[in-house]
Image: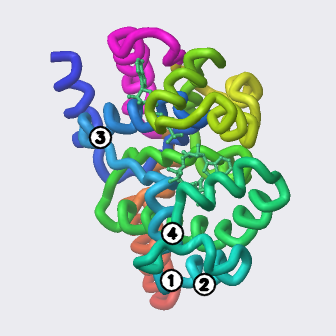
């Protein structure tokens, strides 16, 4: 029942746009939370998917990466061998910075287009699932910002289990990111995902209530309807002014 009211709220409030930031650390549970948002009909822009798309064989990102890292990182089918590239960049900060620098413009552009498409569709609440939201300085785009936190040992265990990697590999991936404890201090809302999925779902309900509350005028102004209102006001103003 509560879930239905929340979902209705989202759609009834219509024509407005709130961009909710969702971030955290590797394997802290961002996808778990973004799937919950999706189940309530709230669209999610997933930066990891965008980052995958921008390095598809033959794309601009692919060419940059191959030029910088060499053809050795390609699979037989010409696609980038992600596991191999991951091994390289997660164990060498300078290579990681290089990859980040090469891909940042493509990823930002891709995220921007996903937002524009949802704006055109009239989505009023969208979630930006961006693992490197703070590192890439995209945090100013989103309000509120939700950080999915998990205790270090649980994060390590879940990462090893999910990706089937060694403790050393998992640690180097975790250490490649800004500490989760720091991200937590920058959050508007924190979901502690160290416990069971039921405990996480309970916290999610509170976050959902916040995220789907009525929008401010500023958020409304950023919506498709807000922009149209502004445009119509300008046109009417010009017509009235000309006829004076
Ligand atoms: C290194 C790559 C090839 C590894 O691919 P792989 O399929 O193994 O992992 P995947 O892309 O699913 O990423 C998993 C997680 O790793 C973390 N991660 C990814 N890239 C980075 C990075 N440059 N720095 C720190 N953490 C990262 C994120 O938490 C992400 O959710 C890939 O992550 C990549 O191309 N990264 C650079 C692009 C990027 O910055 N992506 C993050 C989008 S904000
Ligand atoms: N509360 C939980 N209890 C048990 N397992 C969980 C819980 N939350 C997430 N997991 C599991 O932990 C792993 C990591 O979660 P998830 O994929 O959602 O993290 P992520 O932050 O999206 O990861 P990445 O940064 O790599 O994209 C997954 O295998 C997921 O099924």
Give coordinates of residue 28: x percent, y percent.
54, 28
The label shown at residue 63 is 2
Vertical placement of residue 119 versus 91, above or below: below
The numbered mark at residue 83 is none
Percent x, y for residue 116?
44, 67
- Give the left or right position of residue 75, taking residue 69 as reference: left
Q: Can residue 221 be seen from the camera position used here? A: no
- SS of the residue at dot 2? helix
For mark 4, give the secondary structure. Answer: helix
Q: Nearer the viewer, mark 1 or mark 3?
A: 1
Please tell me whether mark 3 sits on a helix, a strand or a loop.
helix
Q: Which mark is residue 38?
A: 3
Q: Earlier in the sequence, mark 1 or mark 4?
A: 1
Sort mark 4 into few (<14), some (14-19) or many (20+) by Cα contacts within 10 Å.
some
Q: CA distance from mark 1 to mark 3?
A: 29 Å
| Crowd rating for badge 1 (residues with CA inside 10 Å; few <14, some 14–19, many 20+) | few
Span of residues in magenta: 192-215
Q: Which circle's residue, 4 or 3, is located before the other in the chain?
A: 3
Q: Which mark is residue 110?
A: 4
Distance between the alpha carbons at the discs numbered 2 and 1? 6 Å
Q: CA distance from mark 2 to mark 3?
A: 33 Å
Earlier in the chain: of badge 1 and badge 3, it is 3
Position of residue 137 measured from the top left corner of the image (x, y, whole percent)? 73, 52
Q: Is mark 4 within 8 Å of ligand 1?
A: no
* Residue depicted at 52% across the width and 70% down the height: 80
């Amino acid at each position: 029942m509560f879930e239905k009211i929340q979902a209705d709220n989202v759609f009834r409030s219509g024509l407005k746009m709130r961009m909710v930031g969702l971030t955290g650390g590797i394997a802290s549970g961002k996808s778990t939370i973004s799937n919950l948002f999706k189940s309530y009909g709230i669209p999610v822009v997933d930066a990891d998917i965008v980052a995958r798309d921008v390095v598809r064989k033959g794309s601009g990102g692919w060419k940059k990466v191959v030029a910088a890292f060499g053809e050795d990182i390609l699979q037989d089918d010409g696609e980038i061998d992600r596991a191999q590239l991951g091994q390289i960049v997660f164990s060498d900060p300078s290579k990681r910075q290089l990859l980040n620098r090469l891909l940042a413009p493509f990823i930002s552009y891709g995220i921007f287009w996903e937002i524009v498409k949802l704006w055109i569709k009239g989505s009023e609440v969208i979630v930006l699932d961006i693992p490197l939201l703070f590192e890439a300085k995209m945090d100013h785009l989103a309000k509120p910002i939700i950080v999915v936190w998990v205790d270090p040992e649980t994060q390590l265990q879940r990462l090893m289990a999910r990706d089937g990697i060694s403790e050393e590999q998992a640690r180097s991936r975790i250490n490649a990111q800004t500490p989760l404890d720091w991200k937590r201090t920058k959050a508007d809302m924190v979901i502690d995902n160290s416990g069971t999925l039921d405990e996480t779902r309970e916290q999610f309900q509170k976050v959902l209530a916040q995220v789907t509350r009525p929008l401010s005028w500023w958020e409304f102004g950023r919506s498709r309807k807000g922009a149209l209102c502004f445009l119509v006001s300008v046109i009417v103003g010009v017509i009235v002014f000309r006829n004076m």
